[in-house]
Amino acid sequence: MPSPSPTGPCADGTCEIKVAVGDVVTVPEKYGLGPIEVTAITGGAVEMFAPLTGSGYSISGCSGGGGVSSEGGGGVRLSCDQGTVATINDAMSLEVAEILDTAAVLRIEPAG
């Protein structure tokens, strides 16, 4: 039986979505991340946490670090400044397009 496909505005891999703390954004499995949870929004940055679904992990553009266990588990924390475009796992582009008081606008699309 196939695993359930992601649902929500970012399920196809391209979206612009307004998020608040506690929101979860589901992205395609090919991006190597599970659902991305928004953990904090400050004046200049958005902090997120996502479980890793692949065996490796890479990021450029945002500060962040993650741990990958040999079982393929683990997760990663990201802190992305407004206007920064990050590339995650050479597969996903994540931009913090705008930060409002208690919300932020994320732009997600395939990298490249």
Image (cartoon, rainbow, N blue to C red):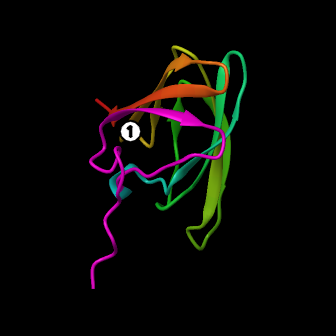
- Which sits in the foreground, 104 or 14? 104
The image shows residue 48 at horizontal and vertical percentages of 63, 40
Residue drawn at point x = 37 percent, y = 58 percent: 29
Q: Is residue 11 magenta?
A: yes
Give neighbour class at mark 1: few <14, some 14-19, many 20+ (Cα, 10 Å). many
Q: Residue at 66% across / 48% down in the picture?
A: 66
Q: Is residue 92 magenta?
A: no
Give the residue pinned by disc 1: 92
Looking at the rendered structure, the kind of residue marked 1 is Met
Question: Image height check: is 107 above or below 29?
Answer: above
Q: Position of residue 109 (x, y in %)?
A: 32, 34
* Picture residue at 47% right of the left edge, 29% below the top: 106
Figure check: 26 above or below 62 = below
**In screen coordinates, is 67 left or right of 56?**
right
Task: State which quadrant residue 9 falls in.
Answer: top left
Residue 60 drawn at (x, y percent): 52, 29
